[in-house]
Image: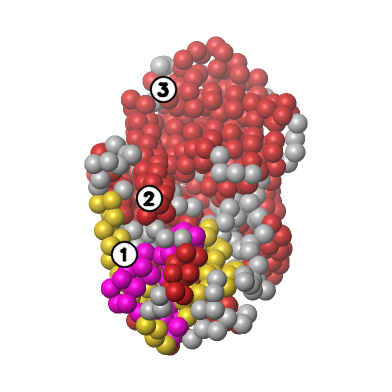
Amino acid sequence: MMQRSDAGPASGGDGTQAHAQLGDERAKGGLAGLIIGSIGVVYGDIGTSPLYALRESLAHQVEHDALTEESVIGAISLLIFALIFTVTIKYVIFVMRADNRGEGGILSLMALAQTAMGRRTKVAFMLGVGGAALFAGEAIITPAISVMSAIEGLELVTHRFSEFVLPITIFILVTLFWVQSHGTARVAAFFGPIMIVFFLTIGVLGAMHIPEAPQVLRSFDPRQGIAFLVTHGWLGFAVLGSVFLAVTGVEALYADMGHFGRGPIRTAWLGFVLPALLLNYLGQGALVLSRPEAVGNPFFLLAPDWGLLPLVVLSTLATTIAAQAVITGAFSLARQAIQLGLIPRLEVTHTSASQEGQIYIGRINRLLLIGVLLLVIAFKSSSALASAYGIAVTGTMVLSTSLLFIVAWRKWGWPLFAAILFAASFLVVEFAFLTANLMKVKDGGWVPLALGGCVMIIMWTWTRGTRLLAEKTHRDSIPMMELIAMLQKSKPTRVPGTAVFLTSDPAVAPTALMHNLKHNKVLHERVLVICVKTEDRPRVMPGKRFEIDKLSDDFYRATLHYGFMESPRVPAALAAMRKAGFKYDIMTTSFFLGRRSIKESPSSEMPVWQDKLYVALTRQAANATDFFSIPSDRVVELGAQVTI
């Protein structure tokens, strides 16, 4: 007879409890502390966009000898429109409503859309995977362009620094990635105050120059931007692509919602960050109108001569913080992808004993560093890198809007017509930005497309290969209940203690169990088969962590539930099961894990190149002992060769 423990399976109710618990923890931290923290982490990327956004927008006008008062005001009007329409209206007001039990991010939105549809649809899956792939490209470009744009300010101090821009940039980036393995919890406390000083500084510098050309305030009239686009044809379209650089990093608003909460992030944006950015862009525009020769680098030329070097130092700190936030975001996204089965299970190291979100993934860190250094060496300037930047961001936005349409229609219960109208209003603008950025494919826009394409191929190959392998294993395996019946008729030698077998398919006998019976010809007096399941939610409440089925007098099956933001720790779950009444002693328990060696097969359903790629990916995966935090001295590994 089947029996269940008091801790039932993860259900919809636990999400509300988890959200409430998270809200209580936030309340203890204080609203002011959360606002300061969000300024330091969430707004690092979008906050450092003034270093290059307007400069690149006006560079097109300089190139075509079309730098006039109307064109400058038109470009700034488009910048303001992007900040208000895309960031404020879309993300701050609407997208942040689509939280997955308090968590955000493109993969969280994908999981929410799949939940809303009631099944794992291919459309939502591909939209989420595509967005995650493009974010991977953005995570490589952001550190390169941010740090390099700040160091280039040294060229204004003296031209002697020009030849040192590249070496200094490389040194800072290598140092930044090197410290990741040591954790950033100690220095993270300084992120907020540094970014507050940065925003105050750029806001004050911008406000000081607005009186030099007060006509720049006409930029608040959206008709100025529309008129510029209509009258300048392809030039206006090219400027539109660069204008989008002003909103790079906007995904962080949504992705970091689980860390700081919707309220603090909105308050920080509307009450502090947005006003500082608007003042700075207006000040840069006024400076260019009054001194057209400043168009080459209007951000740093806002500062007086004595303040130029301090501004370079402050901007370097700010861009390093922005790069750090993107790297941390890449780690979090990678962990979500691992839990959702999109990429191989890589070793995740926790760098803080008190903060679950402080993680480090060595392989991801090395890949990011290699990619960033290659970009810096290949492009050599932030202006050249700017052409590669916008496509990743605009592409992610288009995909997130598409997912938001599904959520609004199926989750929020909007009428289909209203959901289509809602999504179309954003997609029209975002497709315009995307098309404008696609004009830069030859100049470097191919980089994020190539990076995103590679990541998508990896995710597609891994999910497809894993599915085919699971189907083959299921076909070739013995159903669990049939094995138990066979063992009751032909009883093997029993030994004291508990044997734990991990499996991804709880319906059939684990391969390690069959190999143990075949080669060792013994069976422990108690057998526990564990299946770890990742839910379409960020976290699972401890009380809903597991469910236990009693299959026979000596066979048990446990299903452990984890959210896609959690790291599965089997010993901790077993300890919770013991408290709930399951008899378990770690000193008399052995963990039997199967180590499969995947081989290519001429009869595989995948093409040869994909077969080879899948086999290569399996070799990058961390072993189950480390991934599930199982004590290595209690583990017995049994190997097997499997063809796809």
Q: CA distance from mark 1 to mark 2?
A: 16 Å
Classed neighbour count for the residue bearing mark 1: other residues with Cα under 10 Å, few (<14), some (14–19), many (≥20): some
Q: Nearer the viewer, mark 1 or mark 2?
A: 2
User: Residue 448 at what x, y percent from top left?
Assistant: 38, 36
Looking at the image, residue 110 lies above or below residue 53: below
Residue nearer the viewer, 84 or 479:
479
Q: Quadrant of residue 350?
A: bottom left
Q: Can residue 633 be seen here?
A: yes
Range covered by the magenta-colored residues? 497-525
Q: Nearer the viewer, mark 3 or mark 1?
A: 1
- Spot the residue most to the front: 489
The label shown at residue 472 is 2
Residue in the image at 53% along x and 47% along y = 107
| SS under mark 3 | loop
For the N terminus, the image quarter is bottom right
| SS under mark 1 | strand
Looking at the image, residue 449 lies above or below residue 173: above
Mark 3 vs 2, N-terminal side: 3
Q: CA distance from mark 3 to mark 1?
A: 48 Å
Q: Can residue 83 be seen here?
A: no
| SS under mark 2 | helix
Mark 3 vs 1, N-terminal side: 3
* Mark 1 lies on residue: 595
User: Residue 111 at what x, y percent from top left?
Assistant: 58, 47
Residue nearer the viewer, 96 or 563:
563
Determine whether label 3 and label 1 are within 8 Å by CB: no
Question: What is the three-letter code of the residue carrying label 3?
Answer: Met
Question: What is the three-letter code of the residue carrying label 2?
Answer: Lys
* Mark 3 lies on residue: 439
